[in-house]
Image: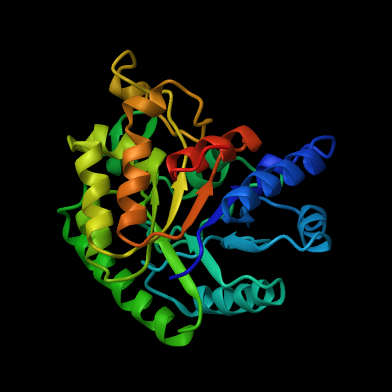
Amino acid sequence: MKPMRLELSSPAFRDPGHRESILSRSRELCARCGVEFGVQLHNTCSFEEIKFFTERGVPLSAHAPVEQPYNWNFAAADMAPVWKAVDENIAYLRGLGVERMVFHGFFMTDAAIPAFGHGRSFWECMKTVLRPKLMRWDGIMLNADFTALPEYLERRDRVKANLAVLREKYPDLTICVENDFPAVGEGDMVPKDLVYYGHPLCLDTGHLWIAARLFGLDFFTAANEMIASGQVKMMHLHASKYDDSYPDERWSDGHLTLALPNAEKMRLREIVRNAVDAGLRHIVLEIPAGTEEDVRIALGYLGYSV
């Protein structure tokens, strides 16, 4: 059985004044428990940040694409430019020792979608392919339920076929597709459609928390549906502030510390334990303001006392 790897996402190290302390303390906590500590390179990371990690021998995974101008849309009609980008980025990431990756692979468009970061916000990039008819409310970027549309089903089958090609091209790598934040036409929103692929999955707790709300699902049941498939090979673990005190149209993403009281309401500890029992060995704390305290809490979820 593979050893457990616990990672912080690279934005947690964006402040040069705190990088060394967060890294050294996180490594120390994980070492006490026999857990490997690593960092996931976010798609917004810089060359300077990558250099910091490689110089210190930190094991790396990647939220792809890294240092590329466009997202990888496996639902696009013309896959030639997508495959070119995938092949180039994987070659680059291999050179950094990356063997585990995750990406968002389903957008309801054939247009190229700019990758956010490096001075461009998520909204600035995604509004370039916004389709108002797919939105739940006018002027709000959250998706309606378009999962029964013929176009959606056609694109979903296209994603499935392209993921099969990806596995064939790179059998030595674990390249997960992630459940999406249900907005601006991203399509991988609910467990049944992700499990349909028969492909390695990354369960993002914050994305599923809002998707369950919008689609009338029970969050805990939905998370366990993904886990029970045996396809969850990575988890993006983070809390959300949103609860019944917020109207649905004001809900958004999570990416907040595990110390947030709502983490208990989300039953994140139980979800982690269920996933580990099902074979999960890779957890990423995708928390931009994450610190060694989040590492400590996550180790507690795994049953360690530190």
Residue closest to the eye, 170 or 80? 170
- Give the residue displayed 60% in from the left and 40% down from the top: 121
- Give the residue displayed 41% in from the left and 64% down from the top: 110
The color scheme shown is: rainbow
**Quick one: quadrant of the N terminus?**
bottom left
Image-based side of 21 in relation to 34, left or right? right
Locate residue 240: give its quadrant. top left
Residue closest to the eye, 198 or 143? 198
Image-based side of 32 in relation to 282, left or right? right
**Quick one: quadrant of the C terminus?**
top right
Image-based side of 71 in relation to 194, left or right? right
In the image, residue 11 sits, relative to residue 179, either above or below, namely above
- Give the residue displayed 30% in from the left and 17% down from the top: 247
Image-based side of 61 in relation to 248, left or right? right
Is residue 276 shown to the viewer in this render? yes
Q: How many marks?
A: 0
Q: Position of residue 291 (x, y in %)?
A: 65, 35
Give the farthest residue toward the top.
245
- Give the residue displayed 73% in from the left and 40% down from the top: 22
Q: Position of residue 189 (x, y in %)?
A: 30, 49
Q: Position of residue 248 (x, y in %)?
A: 29, 23
Locate residue 277: give its quadrant. bottom left
In the image, residue 111 sits, relative to residue 224, either above or below, namely below
In the image, residue 22 sits, relative to residue 229, either above or below, namely above
Q: Position of residue 113 (x, y in %)?
A: 51, 57
Is residue 289 shown to the viewer in this render? no
